[in-house]
Image (cartoon, helix red, strand yellow):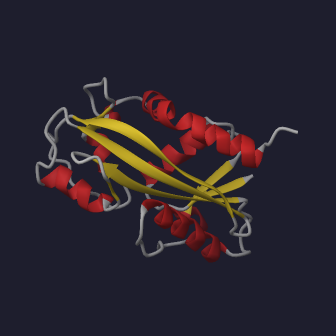
Amino acid sequence: MNILIATQNQDKFWIVKGLMSNCGLSDCSFKNLNDVNIKSQSEEYGDLMSRALMKAQYACDAVGKGERIDIYVGVDDGMKYKNGKTDANSKEIVEKILCQNFLSVGEMLINVRAFAFLDRDGKIMDKFEIELPFKFVGNKNNVRPQTARYPLRRVLSTLEGEKPLAEMSEEESMDYYLLFARKRIEDFVSNHIYPAE
């Protein structure tokens, strides 16, 4: 089975691929937009779920019949902080966190990640959000926003940890993501990919 994760961001691709591989889809082939020569992404507007759906639909339309893709995955991130409301402007928040002392060391930030799954014909299979809590450990290395990467991995830790996610092993950081995402992704797999007879 071929799964296209509709992103050019290599960090996000690694995380989503790892989540899905660990939740029952380890035998699948995962691709991102670069792998299928899609050099742009859809225009983003609306709430997180609308944006995740747009990304998946854009990838489905762009790939067309030229490549065998069984599932298209759109993913969009927002943040919850201070006031507890989800802010879909993640690029602006990243800029504030890295460059404007937006968070204090030790302050919690919740990454709200919307997932949208389309089948090969572009029909919605499932959609949901998960919340991943992190702690800000400071930006002592003066990390700046980066294209096609996820720089917050270098300034956020697990709730119990002291070192940034980027300094953890891949297995350790994936185990942390799975604490909050496993059940919902496994439900998607069992309901839509490998339903019980």
* Residue 27 visible in the shown view: no
Residue at the outermost right position: 197
134, 137: nearer the viewer? 134
Query: Residue 55 in the image: x percent, y percent?
Result: 52, 67
Residue at the outermost top position: 160
* Residue located at (21% from left, 45% from top): 82
Quarter of the rendering containing residue 115: bottom right
Query: Residue 40 in the image: x percent, y percent?
Result: 47, 74
* Residue located at (71% from left, 68% from top): 67
* Residue 146 visible in the shown view: yes
* 21 versus 53 height, above or below: above
Query: Residue 47 in the image: x percent, y percent?
Result: 42, 64
Using residue 80 as the reference point, say whether residue 18 is left or right of it: right
* 197 versus 83 height, above or below: above
* Residue located at (71% from left, 55% from top): 2
73, 146: nearer the viewer? 73
Using residue 9 as the reference point, say whether residue 6 is left or right of it: right
Query: Residue 123 in the image: x percent, y percent?
Result: 70, 67
* 158 versus 82 height, above or below: above
* Residue located at (40% from left, 72% from top): 45
